Amino acid sequence: MEELEEMEEIRLGFENPQEIPWYEKYMLAACVKCGRCTDSCPANIIGRPLSPKDVVNGLKSSILGSEYRLEDEVVWSCVSCGACFSSCPKYISPFTFLMERRRFLVAEGRIDKKMGELLNSLRRYKNALSVPQRGRLSWLESDEEPDYYLWVGCQYSFDPLGKKVVNKLVDLLRGAGLKIATLGEMETCCGEPARRLGEEGMFQEFALTNAELFKELGVKKLIVLCPHGLTVFRNEYKRVIKDFDVEIISHVELLAKLVREGKLKVKSVEGLTFHDPCNLARFNGIVEEPRVILRKAGFVEMKRHGIDTFCCGAGGANYWYQVGEGTMSKERVKEALSMGISKMVVACPFCYAMLNDAAKGMNLEKFEVLELTELLDL
């Protein structure tokens, strides 16, 4: 296995916009100031001090000699949802510059207590929840000679509601004739929270450790429940470890396949809608697959759906800290309520937690948040 990438890949962001690589400066120069990135930015919509358009043009003006200061609060307001580059007609990614600036801020120690606690948890416990690894996934038995290994993720490994989702998924997969195994205590964090917070070195350490573990165990196919993990495993590990060849499969893709094959049945549920996770729809293009299941259940499409979905607010490591008072999760629940919807289906552990918390905070006793697996039976 090849070692970590060269220094260009792990550089620690930028202090001065002049330090931005030349090929990214071309991206800044391409901006036509249409403002679609800011119009679609959920952080901006709920009142955070982030305008992707202003970031891009501020950096560009600074490179050209004007005075511009990219404030820390602006940088930490980003939820790395991808709405900005998804809506840009010139394929500019303001998200890229904000993440690179985070690398610099982390290297300089310019982070708050909550961010520091997250990094300490990842460093000490190898997971994002400050829970000892001992006994991780001991509640889930593994099959010998599995067809797939299952990557449960930090959130569902330790959360009681998450365990219910995982057990249901495994029952469905085994009922459809598949053999499933987990990594048990050897499963750690995928590294996504570290990378989104700006701790690039830590991310690459997780990537190398996990890739070596997969190789040692002979993992060829990996089912991933968390879209955040899916993004780094499928799209970002290959940039760090050049011989990474594990087939990465979202549980949503596999469930849709089994429904198409007639191996799983879909329940009919009234008053149902679906919240597309950003990492599932935008970063991985998994839009049709959940709808293979949802159409049979009789769902109603939300106004903001597919690649135009609205973030729950957990991305960019925001699950562990918050900027300002507005919450994206409540905004999303309000959107469902305006449609007369009482049940929202999700396919992401962080969306599951954020939207459940939002509904409880709004005292919505009859509003339910369901995981996609709950719509299925054998």
Image (spheres, helix red, strand yellow):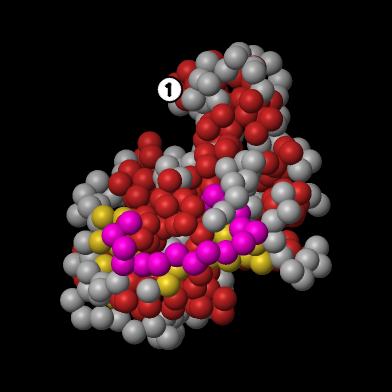
Quarter occupied by the N terminus: bottom left
Q: Position of 261 compared to 358: left or right?
A: left
Count of numbered circles in the view: 1
**Mark 1 element type:** helix
Secondary structure mainly formed by the magenta segment: loop
In this orientation, does residue 245 appear? yes
Quarter occupied by the C terminus: bottom left
Question: Viewer-proximal residue, 96 or 92?
Answer: 92
Q: Position of residue 64 (x, y in %)?
A: 61, 13
Q: Quadrant of residue 145?
A: bottom left
Q: Position of residue 194 (x, y in %)?
A: 51, 56
**Mark 1 nearby-residue class (10 Å; few <14, some 14–19, many ≥20):** few
The residue type indicated by label 1 comes to: Tyr
Inspect the magenta stretch and tell me whether residue 271 lies in it: yes
Q: Position of 33 compared to 277: left or right?
A: right
Label 1 sits on residue: 23
Question: Viewer-proximal residue, 140 or 209?
Answer: 140
Name the residue located 40 percent from the left edge and 67 percent from the top edge. 265
Inspect the magenta stretch and tell me whether residue 237 lies in it: no
Q: Quadrant of residue 173?
A: bottom left
Name the residue located 68 percent from the left edge and 41 percent from the top edge. 42
Name the residue located 22 percent from the left edge and 69 percent from the top edge. 147
Name the residue located 47 percent from the left edge and 57 percent from the top edge. 296
Which segment is the magenta one? 260-277
Q: Position of residue 366 (x, y in %)?
A: 74, 69
Q: Position of residue 31 (x, y in %)?
A: 57, 17
As drawn, 355 above or below 77: below
